[in-house]
Amino acid sequence: MPINVLMPALSPTMEKGNLAKWLKKEGDAVKSGDVLAEIETDKATMEVEAIDEGVLAKIVVPEGTADVPVNDLIAVIAAEGEDPSSVQAAGGANGKASPEPKPAAAPSPADQNTTPGGGHMSYERVNAAPEGAQPGGTPQGGAGGRVFASPLARRIAKQDGVDLAAVEGTGPHGRIIARDVQAAKASGTTKAPAAQAAAEVSKAAAPAPKAAPAGAAPAGLTVDQVKGFYAKGSYEEVPLDGMRKTIAKRLTEAMQVAPHFYLTVDCELDALMKLRETLNASAGKDKDGKPAFKLSVNDFVIKAMGLALTRVPAANAVWAEDRVLRFKQAEVGVAVAIDGGLFTPVIRRADEKTLSTISKEMKDFAARARAKKLKPEEYQGGVTSVSNLGMFGIKHFTAVINPPQSSILAVGAGEKRVVVKDGAPAVVQVMTCTLSCDHRVLDGALGAELVSAFKGLIENPMGMLV
């Protein structure tokens, strides 16, 4: 039986991916472990390995195709002993019907095959063309016919009450894909009868929307409406890539869903700067004669956040809808700016690692983040994050929590300030930090306890060495 190769789910939140490059061509033999293709997600380019042997008989989605929905058919492999040319014919050549997989719910992570590279490649063995397929590959809809749609398209249609039988598919061989359902929803003409009636009743009962104030830009503007506010030729249109789209979506959701509150504290840095100088001076030399490590202030901040979380265990937790997940070790993400967005690689067990280990991990993470070579497991998860803009001279700011994390620390620049000590003015180096908290997990007193523990470690840094 031929084997369908489906667009893999490379992360729990991935809905679409870009097929960047095929590393095998039609007719090539495929062995388990061979790299078939490179898939671009919103965060990285991942190599996806084969888990079956055979011959790559048909490439359905050419390289360079963007926004391919997860679980859509991208290629067909002829299993051992099969004639690749006949499999190509079954895939739509010579006017024969497509070997479409039976419609099914999207596979759970446990049902997918994990590759050594961290990606998930979905395969589905298929038999002859399913009943109801047209000679040209167009699915039959309506009573007595079958509608062929991707699992994601079916899920969206079910949620939005769209009748798939009235939707025209634009996917491979006429298959209905997610964008077809979304287009049908936007047209408002393909609602299932019950859903359509309910929508009409709801619309009739809803109060009329309030008019926007004069000159105000209403929410949910279309592209053309936004452009209408500005003179033609006064701007350049920059299309969004996958990363920027995902950042916009996730952080908008974070502000809408997670109730943020903010706690700001000033931390004196004099003791930390002296200890940092001493530790860096004591670093041994590597084989090239360079210092074995060079600690930054950010390394101390990461370590302090890790220890603070374990000293305030109730704050070392995240929200999980009907419960809170509380952790035994601290996982601290660190925002790394790259062209067009940012990564937040996570330092695991930050409370247990030495400062030099944290420093080495961060240098490696930052280099691979800028090259978009981080694996999903290296930037997913975490309980809190650190966002440091001090190197840009920013004194104070607030950051948006990165779900599912429950907090994020915004770190400003260290600067000399005049303070009163023992009744007399004194000059000290001070750094302003603001903790954004998810009020579903951290109440005000708990957040203040976490910030206080962090401040104590920064101002008495020897406590991080024992």
Image (cartoon, rainbow, N blue to C red):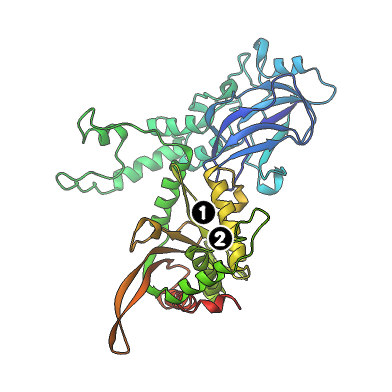
- Amino acid type of the residue tagged 1 in the rendering: Thr
Q: Is residue 119 above or below residue 332?
A: above
- Within 10 Å of the Cα at label 2, are there few (<14), some (14-19), or many (20+) other Cα atoms? many
Residue 110 disc label: none
Q: Is mark 2 on a helix, strand or loop?
A: loop
Q: What element carries label 1?
A: loop
- Amino acid type of the residue tagged 2 in the rendering: Gly
| Residue 318 on image: x %, y % | 53, 65
Decide if residue 379 is in sight here.
no
Q: Residue, x 69% and y 43% (percent of image)? A: 117
Quadrant in which the N terminus is drawn: top right
Q: Residue furthest left?
A: 214
Q: Number of callouts in the render?
A: 2
Q: Residue, x 56% and y 38% (percent of image)? A: 152
Q: Name the residue under label 1.
A: 344
State how far apart marks 1 and 2 are (Cα). Answer: 9 Å
Q: Mark 2 points at which residue?
A: 382
Quadrant in which the C terminus is drawn: bottom right
Q: Pick the residue in front: 366 or 116.
A: 366
Q: In this view, does 317 lie above or below 133?
A: below
